[in-house]
Amino acid sequence: MSAMTAQYVRIERLGAIERITLARPEKRNAQNKAMLESLDAALKRAGSDDEVRAVIVAADGPDFSAGHDQKELGDDYLQRPTVERYQFEDRYYLEIALSMRNLAKPVIVQAQGACIAGGFMIAAMADILIASEDAYFSDPTVLLGSAAVEVLFHPWALGDRLARDILFTGRKLTAIEAHQRGFVARLVVRDELESTALVIAETIAKAPPFAVQMMKRSLNRNLDAQGFSVMMSAHFDTHQLVHTASKSSASAPDRLANFKNLVAGS
Ligand code: ZN
């Protein structure tokens, strides 16, 4: 096993498996720019290394991720020029999330505790999502004046009806319900989260890699043929429109306070 540390992310090579661990537990793995750059670089390395056959994305501490780092964005985030914000979110939120979805090799996410907004989004990019019983998923962004997170994965991953329920109300989807609805592939006790992810990754790593990669390519194309990729671009633009419109509604500090309350209370 070899290990290296990038900023806010830990990378380990476990045989043919690359495990990327979000390592900012004191901030509930809030995704700042540096963490997202590290995640992106690690995914790209794993994608181009023939010896890597499966990728695990994990997280240190009690929570998978409380979402994008609102503090780093700052209170004036919504007041900034539209073009600046568009380019920033395009690079850090849309592109990096989709690079996980589009990685040639299967990505297994192991999630515990809070998976909120951007944390929910990253977890949803998994080919196989494993959750411990304490995990929950929520996207309360519409309550804060945003049209969901940047990637509208919800109806694809949860079905249209459940997506409407959780997006309009911001309610938590427990790991148990998420498992019943097929979003979580395997539901395990917390102590078995890591070992379950490894067993699945090892099973994938034993299969001929070209067959595995082509399987993923074909499954992604199956969704793309139904409009997935076009819809993600369209939603991203709609999401940006609402950010711009939000300038003239509740003040950004109010929204930030609301967000902190929601995250703290969830
Ligand atoms: Zn946004």
Image: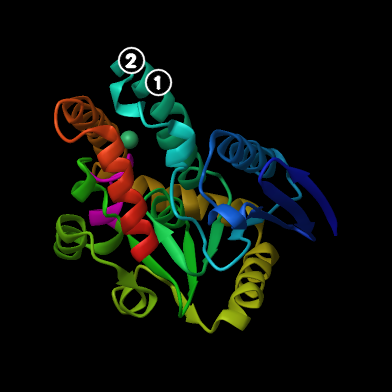
Q: CA distance from mark 2 to mark 1?
A: 6 Å
Res 233 quadrant in image: top left
Which residue lies under the disc numbered 2?
83
Give the image location of residue 5, x and y in percent: 77, 46
Give the image location of residue 258, x and y in percent: 28, 49
Residue type at the position of mark 2? Val
Residue at 29% from the left image edge and 22% from the top image edge? 79
**Label 2 residue near ligand 1, CB within 8 Å:** no
Say which element carries label 2.
helix
Q: Residues within 10 Å of mark 1 (few under 14, many from 20)?
A: few
Give the image location of residue 83, x and y in percent: 33, 15
Q: Quadrant of ligand 1?
A: top left
Say which element carries label 1.
helix
Whether the magenta-drawn stretch holds residue 149 is answered as yes
Instruction: Identify the image quadrant of the N terminus.
Output: bottom right
- Relative to 228, say whether 161 is above or below: below
- Relative to 25, say whether 223 is above or below: above
Residue at 36% from the left image edge and 76% from the top image edge? 179
Q: Is residue 191 left or right of residue 71?
A: right
Residue extending farthest to the right is 1
> What is the tally of numbered marks visible in this picture?
2
Q: Is residue 232 left or right of residue 204?
A: left
Q: Is residue 32 left or right of residue 4?
A: left
Give the image location of residue 177, x and y in percent: 30, 77
Whether the magenta-drawn stretch holds residue 62 is answered as no
Q: Which residues are magenta?
A: 148-156
Which residue lies under the disc numbered 1?
87
Q: Residues within 10 Å of mark 2 (few under 14, many from 20)?
A: few
Residue type at the position of mark 1? Gln
Residue at 68% from the left image edge and 44% from the top image edge? 46
- Relative to 21, say whether 200 is above or below: below
